[in-house]
């Protein structure tokens, strides 16, 4: 320990969970392992890794510490899981149901994605689910005027809601207009 008035600095040999650089160092470590396994990193999306062979195709999408696997070969998926398990502590959550607010369902016709739960969460948080529907909530020729009073008690909550709605427009462009 340092004496009174004496300053000492310790060098960390690895990243601490929660520090700004921790997620970057994790991504670099995972990327290195995937490249070693034979994956090619996407040029336009660095979080996408693809490995092709004559008999199979496997893709990995990484978002922070969540990893999605897609392949036409169950054997390749199992081999990759074994490889990752040897390198890292992993937890297989099974077939994908939710990812980043997207609800994913598979059928014999393909894969569909919706954001119903994300939509309902927004409506619940804004207390709109309890609102009574109206044919027209205001007169069609009403002229709106400005106000001098504060509009929102919590501007950060308003900004957060706008961010959530903008995220929703990624998969629902009809909401943007």
Image (spheres, rainbow, N blue to C red):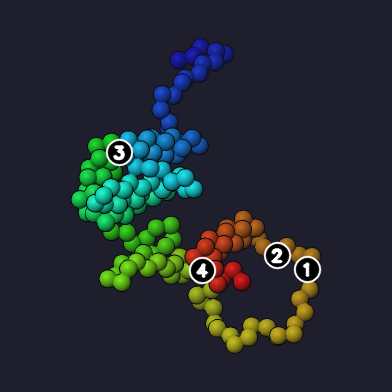
Pointer 4 and pointer 2: residues touching (CB < 8 Å)? no
Q: Nearer the viewer, mark 4 or mark 2?
A: 4
Closer to the chain start, of discs 3 and 1, is 3
Dot 4: element: loop
Corner quadrant of residue 153: bottom right
Comparing 47 with 90, the one in front is 47
Q: CA distance from mark 3 to mark 4?
A: 36 Å
Q: Nearer the viewer, mark 4 or mark 1?
A: 4
Q: Which residue is mark 3?
A: 37
Residue at position x 41%, y 48% in the image: 48
Closer to the chain start, of discs 3 and 4, is 3
Q: Which residue is mark 1?
A: 147
Pointer 2 and pointer 3: residues touching (CB < 8 Å)? no
Closer to the chain start, of discs 4 and 1, is 1
Q: Which mark is residue 49?
A: none
Q: Residues within 10 Å of mark 4 (few under 14, many from 20)?
A: few
Judge whether 160 appears above or below 142 on screen: above
Q: CA distance from mark 2 to mark 3?
A: 55 Å
**Place of residue 15 in the rendered image (x, y in percent of width and height, measured from the top left):** 43, 31
Left or right, residue 134 beside residue 146: left
Pointer 1 and pointer 2: residues touching (CB < 8 Å)? yes
Q: Which residue is mark 2?
A: 151
Q: In the rendered view of the protein, which quadrant contains the C terminus?
A: bottom right
Dot 1: element: loop
């Amino acid at each position: 320990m340092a004496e009174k008035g004496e300053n000492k600095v310790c060098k960390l040999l690895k990243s601490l969970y929660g520090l700004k650089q921790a997620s970057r160092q994790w991504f670099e470590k995972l990327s290195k392992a995937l490249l070693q396994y034979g994956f090619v990193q996407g040029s336009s999306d660095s979080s996408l890794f693809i490995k092709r062979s004559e008999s199979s195709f496997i893709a990995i999408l990484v978002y922070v510490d969540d990893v999605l696997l897609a392949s036409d070969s169950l054997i390749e998926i199992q081999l990759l899981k074994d490889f990752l398990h040897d390198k890292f502590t992993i937890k297989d959550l099974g077939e994908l149901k939710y990812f980043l607010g997207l609800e994913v369902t598979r059928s014999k016709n393909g894969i569909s994605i919706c954001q119903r739960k994300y939509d309902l969460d927004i409506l619940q948080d804004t207390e709109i689910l309890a609102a009574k529907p109206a044919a027209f909530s205001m007169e069609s020729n009403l002229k709106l005027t400005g106000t001098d009073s504060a509009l929102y008690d919590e501007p950060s909550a308003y900004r957060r809601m706008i961010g959530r709605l903008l995220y929703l427009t990624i998969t629902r462009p009809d909401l943007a207009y």
